[in-house]
Amino acid sequence: MNNKKISNGIYFATAGSVWWGVLGTYFFQYISYAGAIEVVLHRSFWTFIILFITTIYLKKWSIIKQILLNKKKTFILFITSILIFSNWATWIYAVSTERIIDASYGYFIFPIINIFFGFIFFNEKLNKKRILSIIIVIISSIYLLLNFTSFPWVGFLVAIFWSVYNLLRKKIDVDTDIGLFIESIIILPFVIISFYFLFKNNFNDFTLSDPKGMLMLFLAGPMTVIPLFLYIKGLENAGLSTSGMIFFITPTSQFLLGYFYFNESFSVEKFISFIFIWIAVFIYMRDLYENN
Protein backbone atom coordinates (compact mmCIF):
# COMPACT_ATOMS: atom_id res chain seq x y z
CA MET A 1 0.00 0.00 0.00
CA ASN A 2 1.70 3.23 -1.16
CA ASN A 3 1.98 6.35 1.00
CA LYS A 4 -0.22 8.49 -1.26
CA LYS A 5 -3.04 5.95 -1.09
CA ILE A 6 -2.75 5.78 2.70
CA SER A 7 -2.69 9.59 2.97
CA ASN A 8 -5.80 9.87 0.81
CA GLY A 9 -7.45 7.20 2.93
CA ILE A 10 -6.67 9.12 6.11
CA TYR A 11 -8.18 12.28 4.64
CA PHE A 12 -11.36 10.46 3.58
CA ALA A 13 -11.76 8.59 6.88
CA THR A 14 -11.13 11.80 8.86
CA ALA A 15 -13.63 13.74 6.74
CA GLY A 16 -16.26 11.03 7.25
CA SER A 17 -15.64 10.84 11.01
CA VAL A 18 -15.70 14.61 11.47
CA TRP A 19 -18.85 14.82 9.35
CA TRP A 20 -20.59 12.21 11.51
CA GLY A 21 -19.32 13.63 14.78
CA VAL A 22 -19.69 17.38 14.20
CA LEU A 23 -21.88 18.21 11.20
CA GLY A 24 -24.16 15.20 11.66
CA THR A 25 -24.70 15.85 15.37
CA TYR A 26 -25.34 19.57 14.89
CA PHE A 27 -27.60 19.00 11.86
CA PHE A 28 -29.84 16.37 13.44
CA GLN A 29 -30.06 18.38 16.64
CA TYR A 30 -31.06 21.42 14.56
CA ILE A 31 -33.93 19.58 12.82
CA SER A 32 -35.06 17.83 16.02
CA TYR A 33 -37.96 20.33 16.18
CA ALA A 34 -39.75 17.95 13.80
CA GLY A 35 -39.67 15.21 16.42
CA ALA A 36 -37.54 12.08 16.50
CA ILE A 37 -40.13 9.93 14.69
CA GLU A 38 -40.53 12.20 11.67
CA VAL A 39 -36.79 12.87 11.46
CA VAL A 40 -35.88 9.16 11.36
CA LEU A 41 -38.59 8.55 8.75
CA HIS A 42 -37.16 11.33 6.57
CA ARG A 43 -33.64 10.03 7.14
CA SER A 44 -34.73 6.58 5.95
CA PHE A 45 -36.73 7.84 2.96
CA TRP A 46 -34.18 10.31 1.60
CA THR A 47 -31.34 7.84 2.19
CA PHE A 48 -33.27 5.44 -0.06
CA ILE A 49 -33.65 8.15 -2.73
CA ILE A 50 -29.94 9.08 -2.67
CA LEU A 51 -28.83 5.44 -2.82
CA PHE A 52 -31.34 4.74 -5.60
CA ILE A 53 -29.72 7.50 -7.66
CA THR A 54 -26.15 6.31 -6.92
CA THR A 55 -27.14 2.73 -7.76
CA ILE A 56 -28.43 3.86 -11.17
CA TYR A 57 -25.28 5.92 -11.75
CA LEU A 58 -22.90 3.12 -10.71
CA LYS A 59 -24.96 0.45 -12.54
CA LYS A 60 -25.09 -2.03 -9.67
CA TRP A 61 -28.50 -3.57 -10.38
CA SER A 62 -27.06 -6.95 -11.39
CA ILE A 63 -25.21 -7.23 -8.07
CA ILE A 64 -28.38 -6.33 -6.16
CA LYS A 65 -30.36 -8.95 -8.11
CA GLN A 66 -27.81 -11.65 -7.22
CA ILE A 67 -28.04 -10.75 -3.53
CA LEU A 68 -31.85 -10.76 -3.51
CA LEU A 69 -31.87 -14.22 -5.12
CA ASN A 70 -29.84 -15.49 -2.16
CA LYS A 71 -32.41 -16.31 0.56
CA LYS A 72 -29.89 -16.30 3.40
CA LYS A 73 -28.47 -12.87 2.49
CA THR A 74 -31.95 -11.43 1.95
CA PHE A 75 -33.16 -12.69 5.33
CA ILE A 76 -30.10 -11.29 7.13
CA LEU A 77 -30.55 -7.94 5.35
CA PHE A 78 -34.17 -7.95 6.54
CA ILE A 79 -32.90 -8.26 10.13
CA THR A 80 -30.17 -5.64 9.62
CA SER A 81 -32.72 -3.21 8.14
CA ILE A 82 -34.59 -3.34 11.46
CA LEU A 83 -31.32 -2.89 13.37
CA ILE A 84 -30.11 0.10 11.32
CA PHE A 85 -33.52 1.77 11.61
CA SER A 86 -33.47 1.15 15.38
CA ASN A 87 -29.94 2.55 15.62
CA TRP A 88 -30.91 5.69 13.72
CA ALA A 89 -34.09 6.13 15.76
CA THR A 90 -32.25 5.73 19.08
CA TRP A 91 -29.46 8.11 18.09
CA ILE A 92 -31.89 10.77 16.80
CA TYR A 93 -33.89 10.41 20.00
CA ALA A 94 -30.67 10.98 21.98
CA VAL A 95 -29.79 14.08 19.96
CA SER A 96 -33.30 15.55 20.24
CA THR A 97 -33.55 14.96 24.01
CA GLU A 98 -30.15 16.34 25.09
CA ARG A 99 -28.48 12.94 25.44
CA ILE A 100 -25.61 13.48 22.98
CA ILE A 101 -23.01 12.58 25.62
CA ASP A 102 -24.89 9.34 26.32
CA ALA A 103 -24.91 8.56 22.59
CA SER A 104 -21.15 9.17 22.39
CA TYR A 105 -20.74 6.56 25.14
CA GLY A 106 -22.29 4.01 22.77
CA TYR A 107 -19.89 4.79 19.94
CA PHE A 108 -16.89 4.72 22.28
CA ILE A 109 -17.71 1.17 23.43
CA PHE A 110 -18.99 -0.11 20.06
CA PRO A 111 -15.58 -1.26 18.66
CA ILE A 112 -14.81 -3.10 21.89
CA ILE A 113 -18.21 -4.82 21.89
CA ASN A 114 -17.39 -5.80 18.30
CA ILE A 115 -14.23 -7.51 19.54
CA PHE A 116 -16.30 -9.46 22.07
CA PHE A 117 -18.88 -10.48 19.45
CA GLY A 118 -16.08 -11.46 17.07
CA PHE A 119 -14.72 -13.80 19.74
CA ILE A 120 -18.15 -15.30 20.51
CA PHE A 121 -19.50 -15.71 16.97
CA PHE A 122 -16.43 -15.84 14.70
CA ASN A 123 -13.89 -17.51 17.01
CA GLU A 124 -11.56 -14.54 16.56
CA LYS A 125 -8.55 -14.62 18.83
CA LEU A 126 -8.31 -12.36 21.87
CA ASN A 127 -4.95 -11.16 23.09
CA LYS A 128 -4.31 -9.75 26.57
CA LYS A 129 -4.95 -6.14 25.53
CA ARG A 130 -8.32 -6.96 23.95
CA ILE A 131 -9.41 -9.02 26.95
CA LEU A 132 -8.41 -6.14 29.23
CA SER A 133 -10.35 -3.59 27.16
CA ILE A 134 -13.49 -5.82 27.29
CA ILE A 135 -13.15 -6.24 31.08
CA ILE A 136 -12.81 -2.47 31.56
CA VAL A 137 -15.96 -1.81 29.48
CA ILE A 138 -17.85 -4.38 31.57
CA ILE A 139 -16.63 -2.73 34.80
CA SER A 140 -17.70 0.68 33.47
CA SER A 141 -21.17 -0.62 32.56
CA ILE A 142 -21.63 -2.37 35.93
CA TYR A 143 -20.57 0.80 37.72
CA LEU A 144 -23.20 2.80 35.84
CA LEU A 145 -25.84 0.13 36.45
CA LEU A 146 -25.20 0.44 40.19
CA ASN A 147 -25.93 4.15 39.74
CA PHE A 148 -28.94 3.56 37.49
CA THR A 149 -30.03 7.20 37.36
CA SER A 150 -26.83 7.92 35.43
CA PHE A 151 -26.81 4.84 33.18
CA PRO A 152 -26.61 5.98 29.52
CA TRP A 153 -29.12 3.43 28.25
CA VAL A 154 -29.50 5.35 24.99
CA GLY A 155 -25.79 4.98 24.27
CA PHE A 156 -25.87 1.33 25.30
CA LEU A 157 -28.73 0.63 22.86
CA VAL A 158 -26.89 2.51 20.10
CA ALA A 159 -23.82 0.32 20.70
CA ILE A 160 -25.80 -2.95 20.80
CA PHE A 161 -27.85 -2.18 17.67
CA TRP A 162 -24.75 -1.07 15.76
CA SER A 163 -22.59 -3.98 16.94
CA VAL A 164 -25.18 -6.67 16.09
CA TYR A 165 -25.77 -4.91 12.77
CA ASN A 166 -22.06 -5.09 11.94
CA LEU A 167 -21.87 -8.69 13.14
CA LEU A 168 -24.64 -9.81 10.77
CA ARG A 169 -23.35 -7.74 7.87
CA LYS A 170 -19.94 -9.34 8.36
CA LYS A 171 -21.55 -12.77 7.94
CA ILE A 172 -22.86 -12.06 4.42
CA ASP A 173 -20.02 -9.94 2.99
CA VAL A 174 -22.14 -7.41 1.07
CA ASP A 175 -20.75 -3.99 0.04
CA THR A 176 -21.83 -1.30 2.50
CA ASP A 177 -23.65 0.92 0.00
CA ILE A 178 -25.47 -1.96 -1.69
CA GLY A 179 -26.45 -3.48 1.64
CA LEU A 180 -27.76 -0.17 2.93
CA PHE A 181 -29.74 0.37 -0.27
CA ILE A 182 -31.42 -3.04 0.05
CA GLU A 183 -32.11 -2.32 3.73
CA SER A 184 -33.68 1.00 2.80
CA ILE A 185 -35.90 -0.81 0.25
CA ILE A 186 -37.03 -3.27 2.94
CA ILE A 187 -38.04 -0.57 5.43
CA LEU A 188 -39.53 1.73 2.76
CA PRO A 189 -43.12 0.33 3.04
CA PHE A 190 -43.05 0.89 6.81
CA VAL A 191 -41.74 4.43 6.27
CA ILE A 192 -44.45 5.28 3.73
CA ILE A 193 -47.23 3.87 5.96
CA SER A 194 -45.86 5.83 8.93
CA PHE A 195 -45.78 9.02 6.82
CA TYR A 196 -49.42 8.40 5.88
CA PHE A 197 -50.51 8.26 9.54
CA LEU A 198 -48.38 11.32 10.42
CA PHE A 199 -49.97 13.42 7.67
CA LYS A 200 -53.46 12.04 8.28
CA ASN A 201 -53.32 13.06 11.95
CA ASN A 202 -51.51 16.37 11.29
CA PHE A 203 -48.45 15.33 13.29
CA ASN A 204 -46.06 16.24 10.48
CA ASP A 205 -43.71 19.23 10.24
CA PHE A 206 -42.88 18.56 6.58
CA THR A 207 -45.16 20.83 4.52
CA LEU A 208 -44.98 22.30 1.04
CA SER A 209 -45.62 25.75 2.52
CA ASP A 210 -42.28 25.63 4.39
CA PRO A 211 -39.47 25.38 1.77
CA LYS A 212 -36.70 25.78 4.37
CA GLY A 213 -38.13 23.02 6.55
CA MET A 214 -38.55 20.80 3.48
CA LEU A 215 -34.91 21.35 2.52
CA MET A 216 -33.65 20.59 6.04
CA LEU A 217 -35.55 17.31 6.26
CA PHE A 218 -34.50 16.33 2.71
CA LEU A 219 -30.85 16.85 3.71
CA ALA A 220 -31.21 14.03 6.26
CA GLY A 221 -30.46 11.70 3.32
CA PRO A 222 -27.21 13.28 2.10
CA MET A 223 -26.13 13.86 5.71
CA THR A 224 -26.30 10.08 6.16
CA VAL A 225 -24.89 8.86 2.84
CA ILE A 226 -22.00 11.31 2.23
CA PRO A 227 -20.05 10.58 5.46
CA LEU A 228 -20.71 6.87 4.90
CA PHE A 229 -19.11 6.97 1.45
CA LEU A 230 -16.21 9.08 2.74
CA TYR A 231 -15.47 6.65 5.57
CA ILE A 232 -15.75 3.58 3.28
CA LYS A 233 -13.31 5.22 0.87
CA GLY A 234 -10.96 5.87 3.79
CA LEU A 235 -11.29 2.27 4.94
CA GLU A 236 -10.45 0.98 1.46
CA ASN A 237 -7.35 3.18 1.13
CA ALA A 238 -5.96 3.47 4.66
CA GLY A 239 -6.86 0.02 6.00
CA LEU A 240 -8.89 -1.20 8.97
CA SER A 241 -6.47 -0.32 11.76
CA THR A 242 -5.89 3.29 10.71
CA SER A 243 -9.56 3.90 9.94
CA GLY A 244 -10.52 2.19 13.19
CA MET A 245 -8.44 4.65 15.18
CA ILE A 246 -9.72 7.63 13.16
CA PHE A 247 -13.31 6.50 13.87
CA PHE A 248 -12.94 7.69 17.48
CA ILE A 249 -13.04 11.27 16.19
CA THR A 250 -16.83 10.72 15.90
CA PRO A 251 -17.70 9.96 19.57
CA THR A 252 -15.05 12.41 20.79
CA SER A 253 -16.64 15.19 18.73
CA GLN A 254 -20.10 14.20 19.96
CA PHE A 255 -18.92 14.25 23.56
CA LEU A 256 -17.27 17.68 23.22
CA LEU A 257 -20.29 19.15 21.42
CA GLY A 258 -22.68 17.75 24.00
CA TYR A 259 -20.72 19.10 26.94
CA PHE A 260 -19.31 22.42 25.72
CA TYR A 261 -21.78 23.55 23.02
CA PHE A 262 -25.13 22.05 24.07
CA ASN A 263 -24.31 22.31 27.81
CA GLU A 264 -25.54 18.82 28.68
CA SER A 265 -25.26 17.70 32.28
CA PHE A 266 -22.40 15.35 33.11
CA SER A 267 -22.62 13.64 36.49
CA VAL A 268 -19.64 12.48 38.55
CA GLU A 269 -20.75 8.86 38.01
CA LYS A 270 -20.68 9.31 34.22
CA PHE A 271 -17.31 11.06 34.39
CA ILE A 272 -15.79 8.15 36.33
CA SER A 273 -17.32 5.67 33.86
CA PHE A 274 -16.01 7.63 30.87
CA ILE A 275 -12.51 7.52 32.37
CA PHE A 276 -12.76 3.72 32.33
CA ILE A 277 -14.02 3.81 28.74
CA TRP A 278 -11.23 6.13 27.56
CA ILE A 279 -8.66 3.79 29.12
CA ALA A 280 -10.27 0.85 27.30
CA VAL A 281 -10.25 2.82 24.02
CA PHE A 282 -6.56 3.69 24.49
CA ILE A 283 -5.72 0.00 25.04
CA TYR A 284 -7.78 -0.93 21.97
CA MET A 285 -6.05 1.68 19.78
CA ARG A 286 -2.64 0.58 21.04
CA ASP A 287 -3.49 -2.99 20.09
CA LEU A 288 -4.60 -1.89 16.60
CA TYR A 289 -1.34 0.00 16.14
CA GLU A 290 0.87 -2.86 17.33
CA ASN A 291 -0.84 -5.65 15.39
CA ASN A 292 -1.39 -4.01 12.00
Image (cartoon, rainbow, N blue to C red):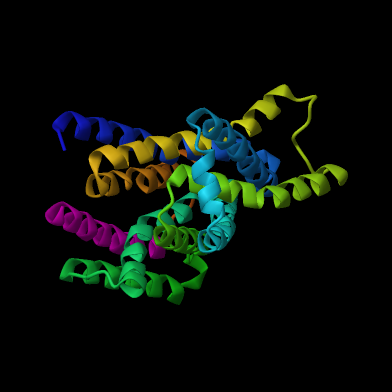
Q: Is residue 18 visible?
A: no
Quarter of the figure that contains the N terminus: top left
Residue found 48% across the figure and 65% down from its top: 150
User: Is 281 colored magenta in this rendering?
Assistant: yes
Percent coordinates x, y for residue 198 in the rendering: 80, 46
Q: Is residue 94 left or right of residue 131?
A: right
Residue found 41% across the figure and 62% down from its top: 171
Q: Residue furthest right?
A: 200
**Nearer to me, 246 or 120:** 120
**Nearer to me, 251 or 239:** 239
Q: Based on the displayed image, in which of its 4 quarters is residue 210 positioned?
A: top right
Percent coordinates x, y for residue 116 in the rendering: 33, 69
Magenta part, dominant SS? helix
Q: Is residue 35 visible?
A: yes
Percent coordinates x, y for residue 162 in the rendering: 46, 58
Residue found 36% across the figure and 65% down from its top: 113
Residue found 28% across the figure and 49% down from its top: 244
Question: Is 137 above or below relative to 186?
Answer: below
Q: Is residue 256 left or right of residue 152?
A: left
Q: Residue furthest left?
A: 290
Q: How many marks?
A: 0
Percent coordinates x, y for residue 25 in the rendering: 49, 40
**Nearer to me, 228 or 28:** 228
Magenta residues, start to end: 267-292
Question: Is 111 above or below relative to 144?
Answer: above
Q: Based on the displayed image, in which of its 4 quarters is residue 31 positioned?
A: top right
**Nearer to me, 198 or 164:** 164
User: Is 99 colored magenta in this rendering?
Assistant: no
Q: Based on the displayed image, in which of its 4 quarters is residue 202 positioned?
A: top right
